[in-house]
Amino acid sequence: MMGTNSLTDNQIYSLISEFKIDAGIASVKPFGSGHINDTYRIVNANINGHDYLLQRVNHHVFKDVPLLMNNLLNVSRHLKQKIRSEQNVLTIIETRDNRPYFKDDGGNYWRVFYFLKGTKSYDVVTTEKQAFEGGKAFGAFLALLADLDVSLVKDTIPNFHNIEYRLANLQKAIDTDKAGRLKEVAPEIGFIQQRSDAMSEISRLGRSGVLPLRIVHNDTKFNNVLLDQNDNAQCVIDLDTVMPGYVAYDFGDSIRTIINTVAEDEADVNHIGLNLHLFKAYTKGFLQEAKPFLTESEISSLLKGVLLLPYIQAVRFLTDYLEGDHYFKIHFFSHNLQRVRAQLALVAKLEENQHILGQIITKTWQQLKV
């Protein structure tokens, strides 16, 4: 068996033995590119049997893992009642004592899922087919959960997309200037402050009841969709941030990760552009699946979400930069500042083209309603 970084082979086998896995194990290998949880693929010695994913839940990020796992159980059970397919919904494997997770002697939480064979994910969207299928996947995910009681799903990271909360944290970082970097970021702070009121509109519309509170994914980057070998969507994964929120959050976060023609930390902001073909394809797939439950107010909020999500990321990156880079992993000094500038440049580019983006959303919605 290959080594697994911080865990010994014996530790891995001991953890696996706590779960209802009645299969010979050919190998266990580190899996995926996630930065929050540690994940290992358990390869079944029987090629016709299930493979599994063993995952350590980061309890420093997710403070209440039992609550998180209760969310996951409620959501996955609801999805399975409608989809009835192990290939299209995450399946949680219980422990020997019928729990959805195992807590080891070091206070770490572990869980196991079926590994969905024949699937793949992409960190970067390169084709309209991929974008369309990603839109379908997240639109269907929201549609399937639209009738699940919102009270059954709790906040795993409170205020995750609450821009008013994020702006308040930024102001504290500005006031404190812990790392002595405030003098470097006056233009970025000015850009953010000029838009703070407009960017808070989704929060205001939610509080007033204009936007219905839904169960949403909250982390709709494209690699959280599994596709088959023909790039057809199979399953939405990484459900740890599934919480009450607004549809505009999920739509906006997806667009943030597919519309940018360069990386989110591009050093030369002049290279940042918009891939409108991918935007149009994603929008069509998303609205095609989500149309049965969406309200007109939610349709109107989608463009606001497109502007808001890169703005939120910039606020978070800047807060971390001012506080000394303690939250996001950085690969060089001022990496967070580079991220801030790239995300704000994306916001500016989206603002310049918001009329075109809005027309695409409206036209697509009207065509689908016919």
Image (tube, rainbow, N blue to C red):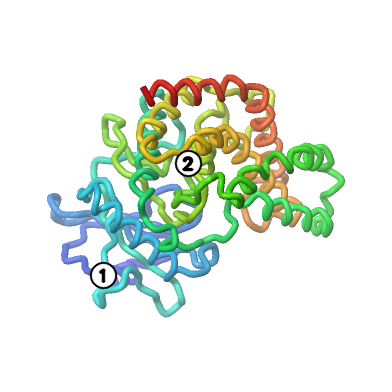
Q: Specify the farthest residue to the bottom.
A: 105
Badge 1 or badge 2: first in the primary sequence: 1
| Disc 2: which residue | 221
Res. 36 in view: yes
User: Which residue sits at x=31%, y=36%?
Assistant: 233
Amino acid type, label 2: Lys
User: Which residue sits at x=47%, y=43%?
Assistant: 220
Res. 56 in view: no
User: Which residue sits at x=54%, y=62%?
Assistant: 61
Amino acid type, label 1: Phe
Q: Nearer the viewer, residue 209 or 1?
A: 209
| Disc 1: which residue | 19
Q: Secondary structure at mark 2?
A: loop
The image quarter in which residue 25 lies: bottom left
User: Percent x, y for residue 6?
Assistant: 44, 64
User: Percent x, y for residue 270?
Assistant: 69, 23
Q: Is residue 63 left or right of residue 140?
A: right
Q: Quadrant of the C terminus?
A: top left
User: Percent x, y for residue 343?
Assistant: 65, 36
User: Percent x, y for residue 55?
Assistant: 38, 61
User: Which circle, 1 or 2, is nearer the viewer?
Assistant: 2
